[in-house]
Amino acid sequence: MTDKPSNPTAEAMKKALAAKKAGGGPAHGGLEGGARAEQKAQQTRNLALSKPAFRKASKRG
């Protein structure tokens, strides 16, 4: 029988959490003010692009 975990998603999350803890501080810890502002602006742009351009019309009127 293979040695597979019962929940591979949970295992992946545990590995990610361990990697995050081993990594230390936040990813933007070493960035200066301008670089941090640019990173925040890029995150905002990515969030806006991931949303649908418009919503479906409501059936109620």
Image (spheres, helix red, strand yellow):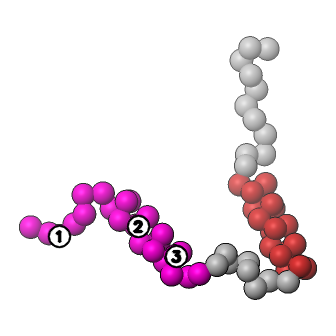
Q: Residue at x 90, y 79 (%)?
A: 34
Mark 1 or mark 3: whose residue is earlier in sequence: 1
| Location of mark 3 (residue) | 21
Q: Is residue 14 left or right of residue 42?
A: left
Magenta residues span 1-24
In the drawing, what numbered circle is on residue 14?
Answer: 2
Query: Does 53 sit above or below residue 21?
Result: above
Mark 2 or mark 3: whose residue is earlier in sequence: 2
Mark 1 or mark 2: whose residue is earlier in sequence: 1
Q: Residue at x 73, y 78 (%)?
A: 28
Query: Does 29 sit above or below residue 17?
Result: below
Splitting the image into 4 quarters, where does residue 5 fall? bottom left
The disc labelled 2 sits on which kind of residue?
Answer: Lys
In the drawing, what numbered circle is on residue 38?
Answer: none
Mark 1, Cα crowd under 10 Å, few <14 / some 14-19 / many 20+, is few
* Residue 12 inside the magenta-drawn segment: yes
Quarter in which the N terminus is drawn: bottom left
Label 1, secondary structure: give it. Answer: loop
Q: Residue at x 17, y 70 (%)?
A: 3
Residue 59 image position (x, y, % from top left): 71, 17
Residue 29 image position (x, y, % from top left): 73, 80
Mark 2, Cα crowd under 10 Å, few <14 / some 14-19 / many 20+, is few
Label 3, secondary structure: give it. Answer: helix
Q: Is residue 37 left or right of residue 60?
A: right
